[in-house]
Amino acid sequence: MYVIKDMPEQIPQADLDLLSGVETATVGHWRLFGFMDRAIQPLLPGRRVVGTAVTLAIAGPDSTLLHHATGLLRPGDILVVDRLGDDKYACWGGGVTVAAKASGAVAGIVDGPCTDLTEIEDSDFPMWSRGLSPITTRLYDLGGGFNIPISCGGAVVMPGDAILADESGVLVIPRDEVRAVSEEALKRQETGKKREASVRDKEQKLGDMTGASAKVLAKLA
């Protein structure tokens, strides 16, 4: 059985442009929700991507719906794949990578393993996954869901959510929260740069600046 829903409205480009300057680790200083399991890591180093979540749920050894879905992706989309608990079969390899990139998608995120790392590298296509596996899926026509609510790395992903993925991990943000989260993160990053410069220039010590030294000294007193 296949459940196929309409493509979601894409996140406004102005919001994505703002989000593109944000580090996931900055948001992790205050936000608790939306972070995928830290085992979902980038296959290509040093990348940061933002885009609109297009969601997919496929089971075990089958990738029929994934092949179909690559033909529906749009420029700026990020395909997020719920493997429904499977961690054995690699649904995403070189062929899917070429198809996703040709559609204009900016990245893929899989809650399971991928394969064909060299081909992914050659395509220069950012991918996040739970590592690699040589055991691949087949076209068994078992069904699945497209643009339905999914779970990826323990995070709820709705079609049309914003995705921010970088070297530290993956963050899912509801579309109506993107601007507020981005503005808060950018403000904190600017403050952090000023603090780091002050410590680097030996104007202040980190413990004095954060208040950590005062807490330690108070306990010792």
Image (tube, grey):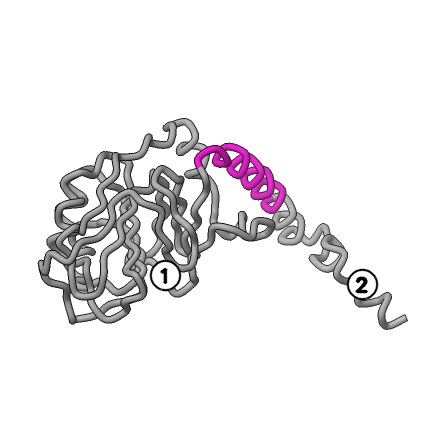
User: What is the secondary structure assignment of the residue under circle 2?
Assistant: helix
Three-letter amino acid code of the residue under disc 1: Ile
Q: Is residue 79 left or right of residue 64?
A: right
| Overall secondary structure of the magenta section | helix
Residue segment shown in magenta = 175-193
Viewer-nearest residue: 205 or 134:
134
Residue 47 vertical placement versus 86 (above, below) = above
Identify which residue is drawn at 36% across, 37% down. Answer: 160
Residue contact at pointers 1 and 2, CB within 8 angstroms: no
**Residue where numbered disc 1 is placed:** 40
Q: Is residue 20 above or below residue 121?
A: above
Q: Quadrant of residue 70?
A: top left
| Image disc number at residue 215 | 2
Question: How many numbered marks, from 0 up?
Answer: 2
Residue drawn 56% across and 53% down? 32
Q: Which quarter of the figure has residue 152?
A: bottom left
Q: Earlier in the sequence, mark 1 or mark 2?
A: 1
- Give amino acid for label 2: Lys
